[in-house]
Amino acid sequence: MDPSRLRRLLERVRRGEVTPRAALESLASLPFESTPSATVDHHRAVRQHVPEVVLCQGKSVAQCVEIARAVVAASGRCLATRASEEQAEALAAAFPDAADWNRLARSVVLRVPVARPRSRAGRGGTARGRAPAPARGTFVLVVSAGTSDLPVAEEAAVTLEFMGVPVRRVYDAGVAGIHRVLAHLEPLRSAAAIVVVAGMEGALASVVGGLTPRPVIAVPTSVGYGASFGGLAALLAMLNSCAAGVTVVNIDNGFGAGYAAGVIARQSRPGKKS
């Protein structure tokens, strides 16, 4: 269950609008729910900021829709990653007017209207399921080395936006034209965290790490010629970075990098420069 939904339910119990028995029934599926294909963790958002994310890769279309329905029913929102065209189209059809499909990121964000409790003035309404935003002025910078790295970079950006974290993008700024990244020193030094996405030799993460006091989450991609070994060369280069503050996620793991940077941003104090 989304934390905001849980708070609203408890407030309604406190005001006497919902009986304790009715509240207990609404929580009966917590902390998890078994569906034909999965055991959905409905406490994920309470513990880790966002509801359980659906990895579509390796799942059938029916399984993706089934699991997404369970997540949305409990939380009002859902992020599906690594979605094929067929899977994304099915999710969009299952949630009309509630699906945001980012083809480049291969990600689908689902947000459905959530009923707001009536205020003391008697006003109610609806709001789309969403995460609380971090402090004003906080943002994460996503930097990609080349255009071929954009699917992974956009996966990180979509994840951050799903978490309610503002994102700025600097794309196609690889070390072959290092002036392209040097033109963005101000956001490099003021972002709460930086996600650097690079394939080939993966050198961009070390360059960025040497320019900023902020934490850098490096993402090696499988982009490159034969000696890149499907991203292994970039992974090893990033792991061997001599720039302090660089940490590395797995090859092509845009979601993991975006989530890690989002957690950092949500705990950052904006406006403080090192």
Image: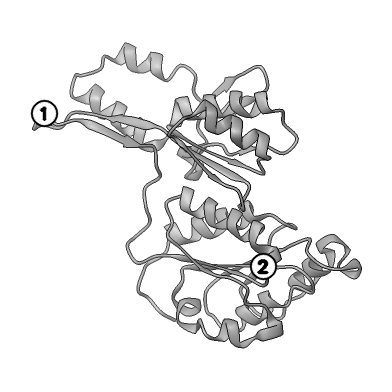
Circle 1 packing at 10 Å, graded few (<14), some (14-19), many (20+), is few
**Residue at 59% across / 57% down in the picture?**
154
Quarter of the figure that contains the C terminus: bottom left
Quarter of the figure that contains the N terminus: top left
**Residue reaching furthest right?**
226
Q: CA distance from mark 1 to mark 2?
A: 51 Å
Nearer to me, 31 or 230: 230
Nearer to me, 170 or 93: 93
**Residue at 54% across / 80% down in the picture?**
212
Residue 1 visible, this orientation: no
**Residue at 63% across / 47% down in the picture?**
106
In the picture shown, does residue 224 fall above or below 266? Answer: below
Residue type indicated by callout 1:
Gly
Q: Nearer the viewer, mark 1 or mark 2?
A: 2
Q: Which residue has dot 1 on it?
A: 122
Q: Position of residue 142 (x, y in %)?
A: 55, 66
Q: Which residue has dot 2 on it?
A: 147
In the picture shown, does residue 257 fall above or below 115? Answer: below
Residue 76 visible, this orientation: yes
Q: Is residue 14 left or right of residue 258?
A: left
Residue type indicated by callout 2:
Thr
Q: Is residue 5 left or right of residue 237?
A: left
Q: Position of residue 7 (x, y in %)?
A: 32, 33
Check residue 56 in the rendering and tell me which mark sits there, or answer none.
none
